[in-house]
Amino acid sequence: MTFQKAFGAVVRRKRMGLGLLQKDLVDRTPFVQEQLSRLERGDFATIHPQKLLALGHALQTTVDDLLREAERACHTD
């Protein structure tokens, strides 16, 4: 699994764990619907640091935790 796909899966899992729809997360972050959808599919190259911080905040976690979980998923797959 690529890091991007692992990161997207972590974001999706966190979002769903909070009972949020993609639209809810879009409303709480600077992402637009298509960007968030692509991110969750792992179809992205980079993420602006401010968007990453907002994403962590909206998912009630830290950027470090998101990145760490994605890194772990890359190595366990």
Image (cartoon, rainbow, N blue to C red):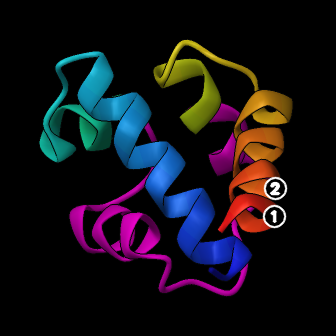
Residue appearing at x 48%, y 86% in the figure: 43
Query: At numbered mark 2, what does the secondary structure look like: helix, strand or loop?
Result: helix
Residue 33 screen position, x and y as percent: 23, 62
Say above or below: 33 vs 17. below
The magenta stretch spans which residues? 29-54
Give the labeled residue for mark 2: 71
Give the labeled residue for mark 1: 75
Dot 2 amino acid type: Glu
Label 2 neighbour load within 10 Å: few <14, some 14-19, many 20+: some
Image quarter where the N terminus lies is bottom right
Q: Comparing marks 1 and 2, which lies closer to the viewer? A: 1
Location of residue 38 (image quadrant): bottom left
Residue appearing at x 19%, y 26% in the figure: 20
Q: Nearer the viewer, residue 9 or 22?
A: 9
Is-magenta flag for residue 44?
Answer: yes
Residue 16 screen position, x and y as percent: 25, 31
